Amino acid sequence: MNKMTIRDVDLKGKRVVMRVDFNVPIKEGVIKDDTRIRGALPTIQYVLEQGASLVLMSHLGRPSGKGYEADYSLKPVAEYLGKMLGKTVAFAPDCAQAGDAAAALQPGEVLMLENTRFYKEEQGKVKKTDDMTDEESTAKKAALKEKQTELARIFASYGDVFCNDAFGSAHRAHASTAVICKFMDVNVAGFLLEKEIEYLGNAVENPVRPFVAILGGAKVSDKLAVVRNLLTKVDTLIIGGGMAYTFLKAQGHEVGGSLCENDQLEYAAEMLKQAAERGVKFLLPVDNIAADKFDAEANTRIVGADIPAGWMGLDIGPETAKLYADAINGAKTVVWNGPMGCFEMPKFAEGTMAVCRAVSGIKAAGGISIIGGGDSVAAVNKSGLAAEMSHISTGGGASLEYLEGKELPGVAALSDR
């Protein structure tokens, strides 16, 4: 990685402003999954051990941007982190009014700011309404960008060094992720961000071959650019989930009532053609678990690549699971984004679990396995095989954009080595 990391800076006596991804599920004040908090701990502990103080900022959920909303407060996260660190984590109830609290920090002390998205300036987005002219929209955007710049300047005033350890938000050009870098002399990556970029970057740009990518999930349209980019990189592309039925229909198969994006058939056909021209193996389901309705208690049957009228494909079938596992087993680099079916329902989970089992053997065989995307991560956690994977990405949208070949604003803005 050609960006500076937290190791490259003398931190003694400094104040570090760190963007973390503490967007964790909270219900009635109780944190239901602390994976993202644990992911940031190595960088947090390193900063404190080096004799620095720390200001943490994050978003949580999708508040309106019109001020405080109790359901989206980071206060429970600050308390939870304090228990993990074994010290008090101070809390600033307004992220844009925390200058005095930040200035008072002593080495080894931690301050967490309230949700940055309580200010609409954080994201700097204007939604154009039907009654808004183009000129009004442009003017509103310009005004909000100015306010976003000012918010970023305030965040920058809280410290001497900026550290981004929030890969899950690195694809956003927000005040706390990218714009802040304009006002700091030193902008570095934390350990988590560094690890994400190294794994994903090396996998996509310098893969040990054979390189197999597995894409699943509901829609082709969500992964248009990913398919296009990966076809220039991989040896084998495996497709599952709802998006497979658009490709199958493009091949001339019947898909019954399965999810299918008819407006993407031309694109699907073009991708199949490109794969053939490049010599990329493009694997699609040869059999499917079909259901008579979208329901956990639906009647099911195994069908071939064609799905009869009145039925819908909700998982890959056993022959496909074997075909996919065989393709995965010979790989040295595997990137997986998206489940093979509706794995949340037990009747339609086996295809995804079969892929999990196959991918879990890659690391032990000396290869690299990278899991990216919320549903894939949930499936791996559900399978109990998370420890067998080389790397599980914390950023769904960010990992997807990285696989598309896009530059991530939160990474691009960091200081070069």
Image (cartoon, grey):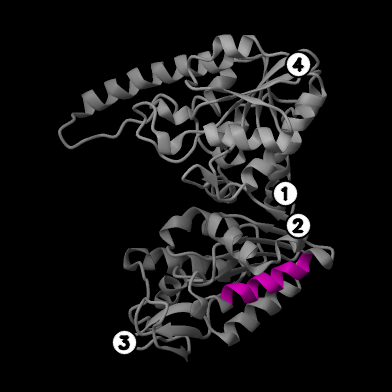
Q: Which residues are magenta?
A: 351-362
Labelled disc at residue 107:
4
Labelled disc at residue 377:
none
Front in this rendered view, residue 49 or 236: 49
Q: Is residue 104 visible?
A: yes
Dot 2: element: loop
Find residue 111 and report its horizontal and vertical position in percent: 62, 22
Labelled disc at residue 309:
3
Tell whether position 227 is magenta.
Answer: no
Mark in front: 1 vs 2: 2
Q: Main secondary structure of the magenta part?
A: helix
Dot 4: element: loop
Which residue is identified by label 1? 199
Which residue is identified by label 2? 390
Find residue 286 and report its horizontal and vertical position in percent: 53, 84
- Residue type, label 4: Pro
- Residue type, label 1: Tyr
